[in-house]
């Protein structure tokens, strides 16, 4: 365990650092020793579990005995589902699409066929399935696979029309091949097309049914190696289904018809129907319908059979949705689906195909959902899905991860969320119920919060590597619904084309349960948690006018075009608090040129709002249009429950709001936060006229004007200096030119993001190009352009891009922050506007002269500056609601390379100081009870001395540790030179604190605190998608996650302890079960031979009878482990016990064999002794001449 004496380290050292080392900085410090307990052996990176719906599913299979469902995807992934909480993710290395899956029923194995013509055998008897064998076809394309029940021979149909047979135990090809030219009529002049179906006769294993795409079906005799019957139809075949008695089968065709054939009557089908076709009266053929892609025919012992099919609707049907049709007797039910159908399976009571199936459910795999239909209840209700497959119900726009939450939080969210559940589900248990839960010992409350494009927020219970939705909040209820097709133009269309309620960022305090949400329409909503239902007559609204300094904008000062506009009051209809000092006549208006001003992007609901138990609206804050320009996108957000404040920022500046008094405290541009003597202050970049700030800072509900410091003045109006007509004309032309460049640039950047994966020619170029675009997005403020990117058929990814003409030099040295102040337009374009990138509320030392901690707000900018605001709070109780909150700027604390990502505070012993909070209490309780319960959190105890706190600041390039109140930099670490950090968080591990970073080059790193020693650096995930950059987040106890696809969340851990216990935490897919007994043949069937006939396939397909297959046809690739070693290959304690048990069995078997051999030798010795004794007695008394 390493100890650091900071005083010894700091003496005589200079401020030099390198990329791979953390260097101490000069400064003074009291005689304290901080003990760092985290070491590199505490860290290990591995994936834990993947949640959500499989992205782009392509195939499905079900084990009727183990009750396990497998889903394959177009990216080569296989997701396995058992009972709720039992899930597993597997990935083929090639990444080719999974075209078919086949279970070895009750054997703990799965066969997968891929689009690259490879077949794989997976072992499911271990917690993390692995590939045992691979067979790669070289000359033929695989189109269909079939594995008969309780058989080890796999039939593989190809695009050429041939059928090959594979032994699944050894994964070798048999010499037995069914050639297409022998299967079809010799007189046929055309190729029958690919094999689309293979199945064996339920009553005769020696006969298989082969379906060709052209419409020909062949019943092939395996023993005689010839075709018994051929069934020809004009329409192409999509699927074939047997009757369980093996006497007839049904085919689905491309014209929407179903044909039923008698096995012994190949001339024509016995029945031809068009389930959804209109039957003409004149006896003609019905009109063709859409193809029936799949049909299944399942019989019941007590009633009519079930015919289930997908597709087949009429072309003129008004319903454009995909439908599943269930025909039972004379009734036909058409079940509409929300998404296109990929595949479906009918679940039956028996795995034997030669018995009454007794179907009880249908599993329907859709493009973006999984539905299970109950066939045994009237109306065919669906089962309630226990899996977390609704993550993508609306596209995910932001994610936050909270580990080690208050233990009472999950039950509270579940109690209010349980009332939101839909009704009408089937009353039966979920039928996919295989596997067993893990026996993990690590258990602490974990919550994932997801924001979505429709304005909804979901809270998920993520404890113990499971995921379950707790509560859903719809923020769009606060606003009026826009009427589609209306004549009036919606203001929101100027900013976003769609999804105006999309969530951009979330700030949540789990201890106080305060929730603050920022949306893409420049709105902020503050919520309180309540267990009581209320009705809000008027939604509290506060409108804020944020306007950056005009000398920061790449255009001339347009102040002469419009009169000065004061801060916008709230319209009287909303009855919301107005800003102090505003003239009552300042109303939203439209200027002569049609530009909007003082208009919000969304309209808050005017009717009473009924709010259910859960999160209820406290205050709505909206940014308004300024002189025809929409408000800037909100880039950062923070809430403090102990202070009663919310702060948010963008490229125009920041605003501090008191949500208790419903008033605006501070509205300043970023440059005005710098003090006049600040070395990092922003000077005017050109001799253009600057806007004079005006207006008071604070707005108070008591109506008194309170003068604040000069640094707190809010820029709310522009200059009114007149200009002549020539200058005005030049300004307008310049503005139009810049706006046109802005539109072209925004469109170019949007197209770059949308086509990034297709335009990159090599992995190196892909990484470099994407990192550059992310750097532009992260380091620049956000402008009005809201880009929607569609990736194929996936949900939209939301990106926010700011218009600028250059990228700041984030690789510059610390001494190069002083920039050229040229008066030319070129120098103006070289600078980018400085936006607020992060906030942090703390009980700290905002000034060097402070002797005790006080409430303060720390903010970081995209240019790497850390600024501090001091907060002066009134006493608690009624005074807090009446007296104003004072806010004053304390100037710049420190400067780093790159934009500031995160800030945190440590005490004198190196322990993290969490932001103070107010414990949650029922907000709708009686006033006296509510007043009594409200207690702001007391400031943490501090040790007397010069520096009793440390501020940890991390930017896109660096990390620094600063002592407070001396503001001396003790440690600095250059995290990366060639890339940049996307996400950084100070996290609490089981053994101590660390700084976790995720870089754009894919590296995940952890640094010790406070010394910033590198502890972990793993090249885990090169940035290939903007989705990862937007959703990656760390949490306490070594947990992290990101959105790996539009529908899936990937959780990872960088904790050695979690990796060691992961196998015990994961569930088991395979459970030893007895296979159900085969159906009884009956007396008469046994007597007259009418039952199912078995076949010894070994005699037909074995090497002795069929010979060897051609070596050039397919290549066998063994898996990482053989069949013998895989039976007990589960790692961890369970695997060790299994291996020990197998070893004991083998030892016992060997001992038994040795004992048998010893007994045989003893018996032989006894026999020899007996024979020798008899011989001795025989010749004992005889003389030599008598022999």
Image (spheres, rainbow, N blue to C red):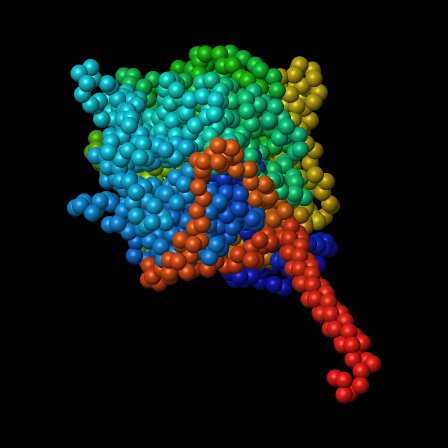
Quadrant (top left, top right, bottom left, bottom right) of the C terminus: bottom right
Name the residue nearer the viewer: 325 or 107: 107
Residue displayed at 41% across by 25% down: 305
Quadrant (top left, top right, bottom left, bottom right) of the N terminus: bottom right
- How many marks can you see? 0
- Residue 379 x %, y %: 45, 18
Name the residue nearer the viewer: 541 or 7: 541
- Residue 363 x %, y %: 45, 31
Q: In which quarter of the image is residue 210?
A: top left
Left or right: 161 with respect to 889?
left
Residue displayed at 28% across by 33% down: 265
Residue displayed at 43% across by 20% down: 479
- Residue 1021 x %, y %: 46, 52
Name the residue nearer the viewer: 610 or 170: 170
Which residue of the protein is positioned furthest toward the front in this rendering?
1186
- Residue 391 seen in render: no
Left or right: 762 with respect to 876?
left
Name the residue nearer the viewer: 1063 or 1154: 1154
- Residue 410 seen in render: yes
Residue displayed at 49% across by 12% down: 608
Q: In this view, does 301 lie above or below 6?
A: above
- Residue 13 x %, y %: 61, 63
């Amino acid at each position: 365990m390493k100890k650091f004496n900071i005083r010894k380290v700091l003496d005589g050292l200079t401020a030099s650092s390198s990329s791979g080392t953390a260097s101490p900085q000069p400064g003074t410090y009291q005689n304290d020793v901080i003990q760092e307990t985290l070491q590199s052996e505490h860290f290990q990176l591995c994936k834990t579990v993947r949640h959500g719906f499989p992205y782009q599913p392509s195939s499905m299979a079900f084990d009727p005995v183990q009750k396990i469902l497998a889903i394959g995807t177009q990216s080569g992934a296989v997701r396995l589902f058992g009972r709720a909480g039992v899930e597993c993710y597997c990935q083929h290395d090639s990444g080719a699409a999974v075209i078919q899956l086949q279970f070895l029923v009750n054997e703990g194995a799965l066969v997968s066929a891929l689009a690259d013509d490879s077949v794989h055998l997976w072992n499911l008897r271990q917690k993390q399935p692995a590939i045992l064998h691979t067979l790669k076809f070289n000359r033929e394309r695989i189109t269909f696979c079939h594995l008969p029940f309780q058989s080890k021979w796999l039939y593989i149909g190809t695009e050429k029309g041939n059928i090959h047979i594979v032994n699944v135990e050894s994964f070798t090809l048999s010499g037995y091949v069914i050639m297409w030219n022998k299967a079809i009529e010799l007189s046929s002049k055309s190729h029958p097309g690919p094999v689309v179906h293979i199945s064996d006769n339920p009553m005769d294993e020696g006969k298989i049914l082969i379906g060709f795409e052209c419409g020909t079906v062949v019943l092939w005799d395996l023993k005689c190696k010839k075709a018994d019957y051929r069934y020809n139809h004009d329409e192409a075949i999509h699927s074939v289904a047997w009757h369980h008695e093996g006497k007839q089968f049904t085919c689905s065709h491309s014209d929407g018809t179903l044909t039923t054939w008698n096995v012994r009557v190949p001339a024509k089908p016995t029945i031809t129907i068009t389930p959804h076709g209109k039957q003409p009266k004149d006896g003609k053929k019905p009109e063709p319908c859409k193809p029936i892609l799949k049909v299944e025919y399942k019989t019941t012992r007590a009633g009519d059979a079930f015919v289930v099919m997908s597709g087949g609707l009429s072309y003129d049907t008004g319903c454009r949705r995909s439908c599943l049709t269930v025909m039972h007797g004379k009734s036909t039910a058409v079940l509409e689906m929300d998404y296109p159908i990929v595949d479906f399976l009918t679940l039956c009571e028996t795995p034997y195909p030669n018995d009454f199936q007794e179907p009880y459910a249908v599993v329907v795999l859709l493009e973006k959902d999984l539905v299970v239909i109950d066939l045994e209840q009237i109306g065919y209700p669906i089962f309630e899905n226990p899996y977390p497959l609704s993550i993508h119900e609306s596209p995910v726009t932001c994610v936050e991860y909270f580990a080690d939450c208050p233990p009472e939080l999950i039950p509270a969210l579940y109690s209010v969320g349980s009332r939101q559940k839909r009704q009408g589900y089937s009353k039966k248990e979920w039928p996919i119920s295989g596997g067993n839960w893990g026996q993990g010992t690590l258990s602490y409350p974990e919550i994932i919060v997801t924001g979505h494009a429709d304005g909804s927020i979901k809270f998920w219970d993520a404890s113990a590597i499971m995921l379950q939705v707790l509560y859903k909040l719809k923020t769009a209820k606060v606003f009026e619904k826009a009427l589609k097709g209306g004549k009036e133009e919606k203001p929101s269309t100027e900013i976003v084309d769609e999804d105006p309620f999309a969530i951009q960022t979330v700030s949540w305090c789990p201890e106080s349960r305060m929730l603050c949400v920022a949306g893409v329409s420049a709105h902020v909503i503050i919520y309180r948690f309540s267990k009581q239902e209320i009705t809000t007559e008027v939604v509290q609204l506060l409108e804020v006018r944020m306007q950056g300094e005009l000398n920061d904008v790449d255009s001339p000062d347009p102040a002469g075009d419009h009169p000065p506009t004061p801060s916008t009051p709230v319209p009287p209809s909303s009855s919301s608090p107005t800003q102090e000092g505003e003239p009552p006549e300042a109303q939203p208006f439209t200027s002569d040129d049609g530009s909007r001003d003082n208009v919000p992007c969304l309209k808050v609901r005017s009717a009473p709002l009924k709010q259910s138990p859960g999160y209820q609206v406290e205050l709505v804050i909206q940014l308004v249009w300024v002189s025809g320009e929409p408000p800037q996108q909100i880039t950062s957000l923070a809430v403090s429950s102990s202070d009663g404040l919310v702060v948010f920022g963008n490229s125009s500046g920041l605003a501090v709001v008191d949500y208790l008094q419903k008033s605006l405290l501070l509205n300043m541009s970023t440059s005005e936060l710098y003090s006049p003597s600040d070395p990092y202050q922003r000077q005017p970049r050109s001799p253009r006229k600057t806007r004079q700030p005006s207006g008071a800072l604070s707005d108070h509900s008591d109506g008194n004007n309170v003068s604040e410091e000069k640094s707190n003045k809010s820029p709310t109006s522009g200059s009114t200096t007149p200009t002549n007509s020539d200058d005005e004309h030049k300004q307008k032309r310049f503005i139009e030119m810049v706006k046109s460049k802005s539109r072209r640039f925004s469109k170019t950047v949007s197209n770059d993001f949308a086509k990034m994966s297709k335009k990159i020619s090599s992995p190196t170029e892909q990484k470099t190009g994407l990192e550059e675009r992310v750097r532009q997005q992260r380091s620049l403020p956000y402008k009005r352009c809201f880009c929607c990117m569609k990736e194929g058929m996936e949900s939209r990814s939301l990106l926010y891009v700011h218009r600028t003409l250059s990228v700041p030099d984030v690789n510059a040295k610390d001494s190069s922050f002083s920039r050229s102040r040229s008066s030319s337009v070129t120098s103006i374009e070289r600078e980018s506007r400085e936006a607020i990138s992060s906030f942090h509320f703390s009980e700290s030392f905002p000034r060097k002269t402070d002797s005790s901690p006080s409430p303060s707000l720390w903010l970081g900018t995209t240019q790497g500056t850390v600024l501090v605001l001091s907060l002066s709070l009134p006493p608690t109780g009624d005074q807090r609601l009446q007296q104003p909150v004072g806010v004053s700027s304390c100037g710049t604390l420190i400067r780093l390379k790159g934009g500031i990502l995160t800030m945190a505070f440590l005490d004198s012993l190196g322990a993290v100081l969490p932001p103070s909070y107010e414990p949650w209490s029922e907000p709708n309780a009686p006033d006296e009870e509510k007043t009594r319960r409200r207690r702001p959190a007391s400031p943490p105890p501090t040790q007397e001395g010069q520096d009793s706190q440390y501020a940890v600041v991390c930017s896109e390039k660096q990390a620094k540790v600063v002592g407070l109140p001396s503001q001396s930099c003790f440690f600095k670490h250059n995290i990366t030179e060639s890339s940049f950090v996307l996400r950084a968080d100070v996290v609490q591990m089981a053994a101590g604190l660390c700084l976790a970073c995720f870089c754009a080059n894919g590296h995940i790193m952890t640094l010790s605190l406070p010394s910033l020693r590198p502890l972990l650096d793993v090249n885990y995930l090169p940035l290939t998608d903007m989705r990862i950059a937007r959703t990656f987040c760390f949490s306490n106890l070594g947990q992290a996650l990101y959105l790996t696809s539009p529908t899936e969340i990937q959780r990872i851990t960088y904790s050695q302890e979690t990796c060691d216990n992961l196998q015990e935490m994961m569930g088991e897919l395979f459970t030893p079960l007895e296979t159900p007994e085969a159906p009884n043949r009956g007396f008469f069937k046994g007597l007259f031979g009418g039952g199912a006939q078995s076949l010894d396939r070994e005699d037909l397909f074995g090497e002795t009878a069929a010979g060897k297959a051609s070596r050039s046809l397919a290549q066998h690739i063994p898996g990482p482990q053989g069949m013998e070693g895989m039976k007990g290959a589960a790692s961890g304690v369970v695997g060790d016990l299994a291996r020990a048990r197998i070893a004991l069995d083998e030892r016992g078997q060997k001992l038994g064999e040795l004992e048998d051999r010893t007994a045989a030798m003893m018996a032989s010795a006894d026999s020899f002794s007996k024979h020798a004794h008899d011989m001795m007695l025989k010749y004992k008394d005889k003389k030599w001449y008598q022999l």
